[in-house]
Image (tube, rainbow, N blue to C red):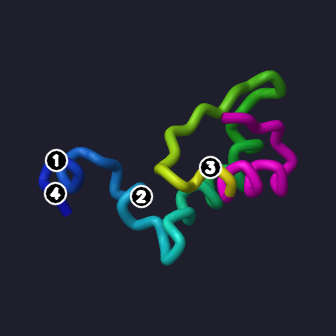
Amino acid sequence: LQPEVRDYEPRQALEAGADGLAFYRRLLSQAGTFLNQDGLLLMEIGYGQQDAVLRMAHENGWKAST
């Protein structure tokens, strides 16, 4: 990895599983435990991850858009 990525990105973002989506999978499945009823969850996603992350959000009962 480039030093500017390795040194400044959160470790969870760099260890994202085989498909690169482990962080989002975990976050979306647990977001209801820390968001209030009217809370928002904003995420930065990688190029090409939009469809998969939107699908995961909907599967977890969230309204989602990009």
Identify the element where label 1 is drawn.
helix
Please tell me which residue is depicted at 66% across the width and 35% down the height of the picture: 66
Q: Check if mark 4's residue and mark 3's residue have beta carbons within 8 Å.
A: no
Tell me the residue that label 3 is attached to: 50
Instruction: Nearest to the eye among marks 2 and 4: give it.
Output: 4
Tell me the residue that label 1 is attached to: 4
Q: Give the magenta part as a residue range.
A: 52-66
Tell me the residue that label 4 is attached to: 2
Tell me the residue that label 2 is attached to: 12
Q: Check if mark 1's residue and mark 4's residue have beta carbons within 8 Å.
A: yes
Amino acid under label 4?
Answer: Gln
Give me the C-alpha separation between circle 2 and circle 4: 16 Å
Identify the element where label 3 is drawn.
helix
Amino acid under label 3?
Answer: Gln
Residue lying at the far top in this picture: please name it.
38
Give me the C-alpha separation between circle 1 and circle 2: 16 Å
Residue 7 placement, left or right of 27: left
Q: Residues within 10 Å of mark 1 (few under 14, many from 20)?
A: few
Give me the C-alpha separation between circle 2 and circle 3: 19 Å
Indicate the position of residue 11 as horizontal and vertical percent values.
34, 57
Q: Is residue 62 magenta?
A: yes
Residue lying at the far left in this picture: please name it.
3
Please tell me which residue is depicted at 50% across the width and 39% down the height of the picture: 44
Residue 33 placement, left or right of 11: right
Q: Which image quarter: residue 29?
A: bottom right
Identify the element where label 2 is drawn.
helix
Q: Earlier in the sequence, mark 4 or mark 3?
A: 4
Identify the element where label 4 is drawn.
loop
Indicate the position of residue 65 as horizontal and vertical percent values.
73, 35
Instruction: Nearest to the eye among marks 4 and 3: give it.
Output: 3
